Amino acid sequence: QIGLGHMYFLGQGVTQSDEEALRWYQKAADKNNPDAQSMVAGFYEEGKGTSKNQKVAVNWYRKAAEQGHARSQLRLGVIYSFGLGVKTKHEEAVKWYRKAADQGLDEAEYGLAVAYLNGTGFKKNPTEAIRWFRKAADQGYAPAQFNMGVRYVNGEGVAKKRSEAAKWFRK
């Protein structure tokens, strides 16, 4: 079912149709397939094949995230960080960023680093921010690499070291 959803979504072997893709993703999502649940969530969040409905999207992301789906965990972190259709809840955002970051998802590691840097969701901790920026940067995540450079220029969480900053800016 999820395969057929992908075919309709991409228009591979069938006429592209967001509505049909959603219908097939929904069938798989109803059987607790976390990849399909995440796809259904994205369709509702973006209004593809259906009308936009952030509440429904959050519900589907949560179902997938609770099954360990890292991208859905990241998405919930972003949604709660920025109050996208829900009340901003930094503690909830950090919880989901952490779950996805613990699975090695670079964007979630970056989100967690920013939370530590700014003290959103818990006490500000530049050293912990560096640890998470570095994890994301080591995976090649450009915003994290840039932030590592900035931290070395400013001496935030690390000693000032322009040569190290230059190394990160070059990546």
Image (spheres, helix red, strand yellow):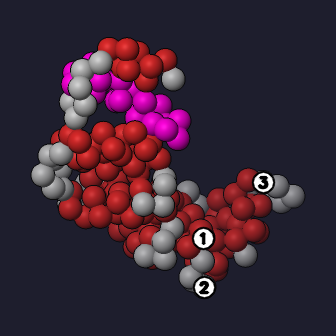
Q: Which of 94 and 139 is in front in this view?
A: 139
Identify the mark nearer the N-term, 1 or 2. 2
Q: Nearer the viewer, residue 41 or 136?
A: 136
Q: What residue does disc 2 label?
A: 31
- Please provide percent x and percent y for residue 57: 43, 66
- Which residue is at 27% across, 52% downward? 81
- Which residue is at 87% across, 58% downward? 13
- Which residue is at 53% across, 35% downward? 140
Are dots 1 and 2 in contact, CB under 8 Å? Answer: yes
Numbered badge on residue 11: 3
Q: Is disc 2 surrounded by few (<14), some (14 to 19) or many (20+) residues within 10 Å?
A: few
- Whether residue 48 is visible, yes or no, is yes
Q: What residue does disc 1 label?
A: 36
Question: Which stretch appears magenta?
Answer: 137-155
Element type where label 2 sits in the image:
loop
Residue 145 belongs to magenta span: yes
